[in-house]
Image (tube, rainbow, N blue to C red):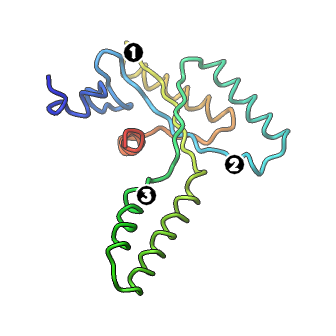
Amino acid sequence: MKKGNTSTQTLLGVKHFSRNGVQTAGHGELAYFLVTPTNISVLSRVSIAHKIRHLTQLLSAQPDIEILCMDARENFDDNKVYLDVRREDETNPAIRELLEKDKRFLDDIQLQMSTAREFMFAYRLTHESEDGALATLNRIEKHISDQGFEVKRANKEDIKRFLSRYFG
């Protein structure tokens, strides 16, 4: 099969979105949990140590959880290149100045967003009934929450946003 004719879904091994997350081709179902990051730069050393211990406890109790971390920012590089090219071609000094301000504005936004992170925990469901899967995912979500993490089950739009940024 030619790569040009292969869908993104096929390349990723995704059969379809399921009730719990993503059904993969041959590797079971993946359920995702969005975990809100904590700004550790404002925490004391003791608080940071507690957070690390809670994460360690979570991973010890649930070693099959996978952690995904991604910058929660958009990439403005193409827009900045466009503004540079446009500015070079512009003869009107006022327009050139506006284009430069636009580029600085994009730089500022990108800098502000560069430290933002998003975390997802993934859990692979295998050979579980619908009721069993739901019970397992509820238990995992409660366990993550009990360790002091703000968590919610990722819906289809959350998963698509995360994957599109990852593969973008």
Q: Residues within 10 Å of mark 2 (few under 14, many from 20)?
A: few
List the residue tagged with mark 3.
76
Read off the residue under disc 1.
128
Residue 85 in percent (x, y) is at 35, 67
Name the spot of residue 25 as percent of width and height, x first. 28, 19
Mark whose residue sits in front, 1 or 3 = 3
Q: Earlier in the sequence, mark 1 or mark 3?
A: 3
Mark 2 and mark 3: Cα distance apart in space: 24 Å
Residue located at (36% from left, 45% from top): 157
SS state under label 1: loop
Q: Residue furthest top?
A: 127
* Residue 116 higher or lower than 112, as above or below: above
**Separation of residues labelled 1 and 2 (CA atoms):** 36 Å
Q: CA distance from mark 1 to mark 3?
A: 43 Å
For marks 2 and 3, give the one nearer the viewer.
3
Q: How many marks?
A: 3
Circle 2: residue type: Asn
**Vertical arrangement, residue 74 with respect to residue 166, above or below:** below
Report helix, strand or loop for mark 2. loop
Tag 1: Cα neighbours inside 10 Å, few (<14), some, or many (≥20)?
A: few
In this figure, which residue is indicated by the disc labeled 2?
A: 39
Amino acid under label 1? Answer: Glu
Left/right placement of residue 13 relative to residue 4 reads: right
Q: Which mark is residue 2?
A: none
